[in-house]
Image: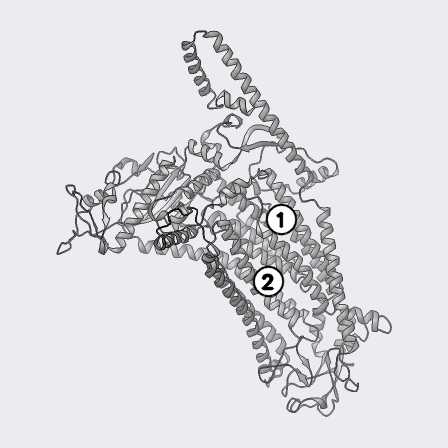
Amino acid sequence: IINNYLGGTQGGAVDKASPSGMHFRDSKRKVDYVLAYHYRKRLARHPAGAGSPEPTHESASLALVSNGGTGKGCAELQQQDGGQYAPQEQPRPLGVEVIELGPLDTLEEEKRLQREEYERNLVEVGLEIEKDPENKSQGLSFVRIHAPWQVLSREAELLKIKMPTKKMYEITEEGGILKTLNEIWCKLTKPLQPQVPQQENTNMKSLSYPFSREKIYLYNIKDKDTFFDNATRSRIVREILKRVSTKARNSTGIGTLIANHVYDAAYPLHDGEYEGQNDDMNERKLLYREWARYGVFYKFQPIDLIRKYFGEKIGLYFAWLGLYTEFLIPSSVVGIIVFLYGCITIEGDIPSKEMCDQHNAFTMCPLCDKFCDYWNLSSACATARASHLFDNPATVFFSIFMALWATMFLEQWKRLQMRLSYFWDLTGLEEEEVSFLSEHPRPEYETKLLQKKLKNKSITTENSNEDEKEKLTWSDRMPGYAANFGLILFMIMLTFSAVFGVIVYRITTAAALSFSTNETTRSNVRVTVTATAVIINLVVILILDEIYGAVAKWLTEIEVPKTEKTFEERLILKAFLLKFVNSYAPIFYVAFFKGRFVGRPGHYVYVFEGYRMEECAPGGCLMELCIQLSIIMLGKQLIQNNLFEIGIPKLKKLFRKLKDERTEPKEMDTNQSKDPQQWDLDYILEPFTGLTPEYMEMIIQFGFVTLFVASFPLAPLFALLNNIIEVRLDAKKFVTELRRPDTVRAKDIGIWYNILSGIGKLSVIINAFVIAVTSDFIPRLMYQYAYSQNGTMHGFINHTLSYFNVSHLKAGTQPENSPFAQDVLFCRFKDYREPPWSQNQYEFSKQYWAVLSARLAFVILFQNLVMFLSVLVDWIIPDIPKDISEQIKKEKSVLLDFFLKEEHEKLKLIESFIARDKQKHKSGTKGERIRAASFCQFNRCQKGSFASFSSQHTEV
């Protein structure tokens, strides 16, 4: 059972390596899991009390300490002060020396003992292991694990793993026009389908049932070695590794041992190499050829094969990503149409024409004190024309469309999720199974609990009747919660501080450039400041994103959640909160705050001394919002989602390789095979750390697509182009760059669905405010239908500009050396205020309050209309497709019939066998013995296909 090749005891066998790299050295038993660890042997040993330390011979001492029978030699040595191990009051066997251990040797010895105990316990639960010889003074070694049939069947029953039975049943297809359309669609998309093995008869489905050894006759077991596929085998072994404990440090499971650096890694093997000259096709190579290459970007994803190889959780992620990318196609098309509508109607836009008319020029008030002159509104003609591309009536329609699009996407995902659950046999995923899989405590939780127990034991040794099932209470977690609250608040304030810093940069830079003597510099102040500020914002966002990811993980760790599921959910919430604020804070500022607190000529709001708050461009803030959104979105996608994802794993891999080469001595290992085995190749790969980063970048992108889509209709198009690359990038990373993840069963995408739903609802409110507050849609509508004399937009620009008497400017703020100073009596500024000749000069006018009321009314109307339509769409589209709900009902009835039929046939067979046996052997004791023997023989013939008659009869 244990192939422990130590000290060259089985020299011939050591040189022989598994030809496929996937089996033990006997080339028969499959490697289901691998444990990797670094070892370090003692090079010098000194007898206790010796005057001059001299190195002793290695083999004698090592044989005694490492391989001393059943390990009693090490157990009998008790630690003394100074790190020495000495026998106490026990006769010393002949040839045993007292060994002095240094601090590193002591730690290494403790790790070795833990490994030995853990591997011994693995063998006790039925696993078979094979170890590498430790031929170097220090190096990397592997423990390969194989689960025999007895262990697989026992654990599969415990985990309630659904396995296919002998029974196949027909899937009822929808008839009529839907079937015809589906057939046409299949023919049209045939070139886009991946070339992967498909089930011969797609209309038939195998009936699945949780594995049971008592009902083993139900399952179609042709070969016990291949009945459980590689993913299922590794999943079973992983559950055993989590469960098996060691007495040293009260370690429970492989997670604790890896956390304590007893082992470096634990992972299942990939199914061979993904590229090579050999013709042997495996699932990994097939995935690489049909899915994980940029050359097949136009093909659909082989979701069933992804699920089979990586498990349901990762399969659901790629199914969700595929559906999201498909849904971006119609939204991209509509966005392009809206953008083209703006391009076509730009020549007929009356307000921009009026703004560009140099004959009826409007003299505007200076943009800064002293150094800025009066200026003509016609100089902002280009900005006004560009604003029309995104600020037109079509954007209102597009906002409503995108709100409904988000609802339809979520509804369609629920339907697809249910369909996948049915075909992947997740519909009956029992709560006990989910809780069983997620109830393993995390190593950090166990360590904290152990510290608490030890502390309580030292304080109160008298109370012996304490409850054994101790757990961490709120008082134990209070420091962690306090740190969480304080640091998250600090991080959010840090984000706001960064945004404020960029605002100060814009204000001061704009003021500095306004002092320039160069006419070109002065005329391009706004463009220069906007472009540089957005790039600074992008850099700050990228840096803070990386910091916030690490901080969120650390904050979750100090909370000490009990299970991995709780840890993951809390980490997601913290990371999302911090990254959401970080990504959208600058955009929120431009959309809702910039230009709102400027004041008016003669009474401006100042930041610090002499710096005025920045204003929106003459065409409004929507154009700047569009620039800000597009650069941040494209920058994050290009740099963070693509360059970081490609570059960082390669740098980590290179760093780890250099580190291993530096730490391992250059020693010849004669027992090592020339070609690296699969476990060697997989160890070099990056460990899988979860799907949180993959989901997070897509959720943030979903926010960019939905939250401010009124200002940037091309956002879905850029998201689509990114996702076409992203799908293949993620696929390539999973197939070629990462170790094979443990397969995890999951019914849905978990908390991410709630976040998506929340963003969808928030997008309705934000887009309503963007249209009402940031754009000129409401003022234009109000002017056309309430104030225009002829019902057209002629005179709109004049209507939105207020008058200011230049003699009312404060002393020291008038333009210096202005050539227009003598000619200008009144300047104009954008606001609804009373003129200087009015009794209430410069107060808000009636038009201001009318427009404000219209804005708020639009927000309420838009929000309720879109929410109503979303609820209507949600109600019309059922969560479970009709055909799937019927198939689930049919499956239950088929399963019941199949059970009754099998049990009935088995009962008849046993009764006929016993009756025939009674006729042949009428004698008492002799007949019973023969009958028992023949019954056992019958059992063997059926390969364990039924258990005792009485138990089966009771079940029937």
> Residue 543, position in %: x, y?
50, 65
Residue type marked 2: Met
Image quadrant occupied by the C terminus: top right
Task: Give the residue furthest to the right.
Answer: 790
- Residue 323's tag is 1
Between disc 1 and disc 2, whose residue precedes? 1
Q: Is residue 285 visible to us here?
A: no
In the image, residue 502 lies at what x, y percent?
Answer: 56, 73
Between residue 514 and residue 111, name the one nearer to us: 111
Mark 1 closeness class: few <14, some 14–19, many ≥20 residues within 10 Å: some
Residue at the extreme front: 462
- The spot of residue 832 in percent (x, y) is 75, 77
* Whether residue 928 can be seen here: yes
* Image vertical order of residue 494 relative to residue 460, above or below: below
Quadrant where the image shows the N terminus:
top left
Counting from the top left corner in percent of width and height, residue 260 is at 36, 51
Q: Is residue 459 left or right of residue 185?
A: left
According to the picture, the residue beneath numbered tag 2 turns out to be: 633
Three-letter code, disc 1: Leu
> Could you say which disc has been placed on residue 358 in the image?
none
- Furthest-left residue in view? 51
Q: Is 244 placed left or right of 799 in the picture?
A: left
